[in-house]
Amino acid sequence: MRKIAVLTGGGDCPGLNAVIRAVAKSAHQYGLEVLGIRDGFRGAVEGDFMPLTLKEVSGILPRGGTILGTTNRDNPFAYETIVNGTAQILDRSGDVIRNLKDHDVDALLVIGGDGSLNIALKFANLGLNVIGIPKTIDNDLMATDQTFGFQTAVDTATEALDRLHTTAESHHRVMVLEVMGRYAGWIALYAGVAGGADVILIPEIPYTLNRVAQAIQKRAKQGKKFSIIVVAEGAKPRGGEIVVERLVSGRFDPIKLGGIGAKIGNDLEEQYGLETRVTVLGHLQRGGSPNSYDRVLSSRYGVAAVDAALEEEFGIMVALRGRDIVRVPLNKAVDKLKQVLLIDPLLIAARNLGLEMGD
Ligand code: F6P
């Protein structure tokens, strides 16, 4: 093992730079050379590589984003390529393998969520030495207790809830905060509990508007003239359509999520006469500096991935189990999305706190 390459795939996430730094620093300890691949799998197809020495990673630990760049939709197995002036979808996985070979790369570290790790698995199945590192604010990856970036997103959403509380209380309003999370309710659940929300709506529990309105009206009877609702972008009313879009025709379709906060706000005003305001937190949850928890977790993931490379254990993802970082087969990581179970201890605690879940 002499040279490793690293790329950041999919949406950005607080802690990406902390992982990149940990990989470079740890590899340096062992005398390994590290290459960064720019813009995720696009750079792997196009051969856009850069050296990652201690100089490049100096000072990046607290920085949001990724110094390597990333793209959401580039899949080497179904890659949009312009041929004679027209766009075609081609399998360019061979270019990735050739580029890595040309740069004498012995192992590829893929820092990514569900989409990028699915691609990593395909390369592992083709015999490439691949190691995955679990990234996503959504925390929806199986086989790890936590992805890095999640806790920072929860902090951001919690701060937003704290701020919404004071204005909601002053104006006697209902405030709806729509948070990210794709088809999982982790951010909504954790931030809802941490931020003292009154109602939490998540994709795993289709909601009934009447239940939400009743909870608000009950509070009003108790003299509480404001209420806070946190809703995950993937939440749906009972009877509404629930679609999980993952790989569609080999390419990632844009995720059609969001707008549920606005719908709930409108419905509460129109059907129940409750004065409601809606905030969509959006990409604020992805940007900015990772919190201390995510800096530590990211650093540990980076170090553990280099360890796995040195021990030549490939086709795995580094994962958190309790306090330990372990190695799990990549296929277990991307088997299915990790959603909130009805028996999740925090969900049960939320109910015991009297929080309305809309069911
Ligand atoms: O997976 C991370 C995430 O931020 C989701 O929570 C959200 O649905 C999606 O990415 C947004 O993607 P984009 O950056 O393409 O708008």
Image (cartoon, rainbow, N blue to C red):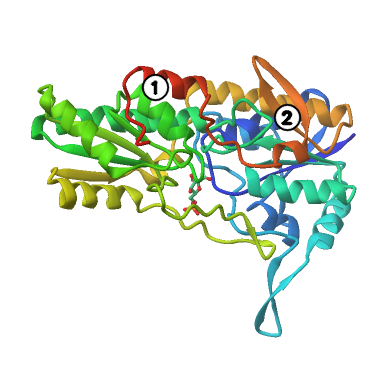
Residue 336 found in image quarter: top right
Q: Mark 1 points at which residue?
A: 350
Above or below 220: residue 330: below
Does residue 27 appear anywhere in the picture? Answer: no
Secondary structure under tag 1 reads helix
Q: Which residue occupies 86% across, 58% down?
A: 98
- Residue 310 in view of the camera: yes
Which tag, 1 or 2, sits closer to the chain's start?
2
Q: Mark 2 points at which residue?
A: 318
> What residue type is disc 1 on?
Ala
Count of all numbered marks drawn on residues in the image: 2
Q: Position of residue 30 (x, y in %)?
A: 82, 24
Nearer to the camera, 254 or 204? 204
Query: On screen, 317 above or below 355?
Result: below
Q: Which of marks 1 and 2 is in front?
A: 1
Residue in view at x 37 percent, y 48 percent: 237
Across and down, in percent, residue 269 comes to 16, 49
Q: In which quarter of the image is the N terminus?
A: top right
Q: Where does the image place residue 208, in percent across and percent down from the top left?
A: 33, 43
Q: Which of these two is toward me, 61 or 31?
A: 61
In the image, is 306 to the left or to the right of 135? right
Badge 2 element: strand
Q: What residue type is labelled 2?
A: Val
Q: Is mark 2 within 8 Å of ligand 1?
A: no
The quadrant of the rendering that contains the C terminus is: top left
The answer to which image quadrant residue 18 occupies is top right
